[in-house]
Image (cartoon, rainbow, N blue to C red):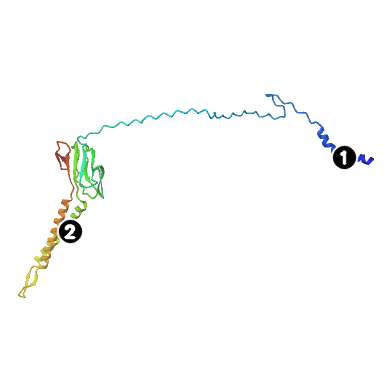
Amino acid sequence: MRSACLASVLVALAFAPSAFAQAVPGPPDAPAAPPGAPPTPGQDPASPKVPEAAEPTAPPSGIAKPEEPPPPAPPPAAEPAKEPAQEPGKGTPRIHIEADRPGVKLLRISGVVSDRAGEGIFVRTACEAPCDRIVDGRKDQVFFFGADGMVPSRGFVLSNVGGDVVAHVNGGSFFGRQLGFLFGGFGGAAVLGGAIMLGIGYSADGATLNNEGKVTQGENRALTTGGFVTLGVGAAMVATGITLVLLNKTEIKLVQATPKSAGVRLQMGRIVF
C-alpha cells in the first residue's frame, strides 16, 4: 500500500514541470508607447513608416481618352536667293563648242614651270563640249582646245572677245601626225642615202664589159641605179609624211553667235574680228 502511493507521487512529479511552467505567468507586457513619444532607454527606435504611394487607377473602359492634337507642320524652308545670271561681256564670252569628235575640252594654261630637266605647264579645264558657259579671260590667260588622241590646237586669248561665241573645232589625229613625222624622218634618211649612192656611183671608175667584149671604164651603174631607187622611195616617204602632218593638225574657228555675226581668226596668238 505504501509503495503504491510512492509510485503515484513519482509519476505526478514527472509530469508536473510542464504543467507548472504553463501555469507560471511571465513578466507583464510593457505598455505601448504613445505615437511621437521618445524611445525608452535600451530600446531601439522604431523605424518610421513611409506611406505607400497609391497606384494610379485606370479610367473606366467606357470613357474614351481625349486625343492629343497633332503637332503643327514645320514651316516651309525658305528658298535661297538666286544669283542674277551673269551676262557675257568683253573678256567673258559664253562659249559653245562644236567639234568633230567627243570629249573636246577648252583648256587654260595656269602656270609654267622650268627647271634643268625641261619646261612644263599647268593646265586646267575651263569647260567641256558643248560647254555653253561663260569663260573668264580678262587676265590674258592662254587657252587651247584638246582631247584624248587629238592634236592640241594653237593657243589664243579671250580678253578682246565678248558675247556668245561658237567654236568650231576640227581636230587632227595625234597618231596620224606622229606617223607623218615618222615617215618624214625615214624618208629624209632615204633621200640622203640615195644622194650619197649617186655621188659615189658617178665618181667611181667602174670596169664593165661592152657588147663587143671589151672592158670600158665609166660610172658604177649598180650604185647609180640603187641611188636613184633609194632617192625615189625617200622622196615618196617625205611627201607622205608632210601630207600626214598637214592633214592632222587641229583647226579652230570662232564665230559670233549673233545676228551681226562675223568670222574670227587667230593672228599672232590673238583673236581678231
Give the residue type that dot 1 points to. Answer: Val
Residue 186 — which label?
2
In x, y percent, where is residue 82?
Answer: 29, 32
Examine the image and state in which quarter residue 112 appears.
Answer: top left
**Could you say which is closer to the camera, residue 32 or residue 124?**
32
Give the residue type that dot 2 points to. Answer: Phe
**Could you say which is closer to the camera, residue 249 or residue 58?**
58
| Number of marks in the rendered image | 2
Residue 178 — which label?
none
In x, y percent, where is residue 258?
Answer: 17, 36
**Could you say which is closer to the camera, residue 257 or residue 245?**
257
**Mark 1 or mark 2: which comes first in sequence?**
1
Examine the image and state in which quarter residue 124 appears.
Answer: top left
In x, y percent, where is residue 11?
Answer: 87, 40
Q: Is residue 42 left or right of residue 68?
A: right
Badges 1 and 2: C-beta atoms under 8 Å apart?
no
Seen from this angle, which residue lies furthest right? Answer: 1
63 up-or-down from 111: above or below: above
Query: How crowded is the residue under tag 1: few (<14 C-alpha within 10 Å), some, or many (20+)?
Result: few
- Tag 2, which secondary structure? helix
Q: Quadrant of the C terminus?
A: top left
In x, y percent, where is residue 211?
Answer: 5, 74
Q: Quadrant of the N terminus?
A: top right
- Tag 1, which secondary structure? helix
39 up-or-down from 107: above or below: above
Residue assigned mark 1: 11
154 up-or-down from 220: above or below: above
Q: CA distance from mark 1 to mark 2?
A: 151 Å
137 up-or-down from 53: above or below: below
Seen from this angle, which residue lies furthest bottom? Answer: 213
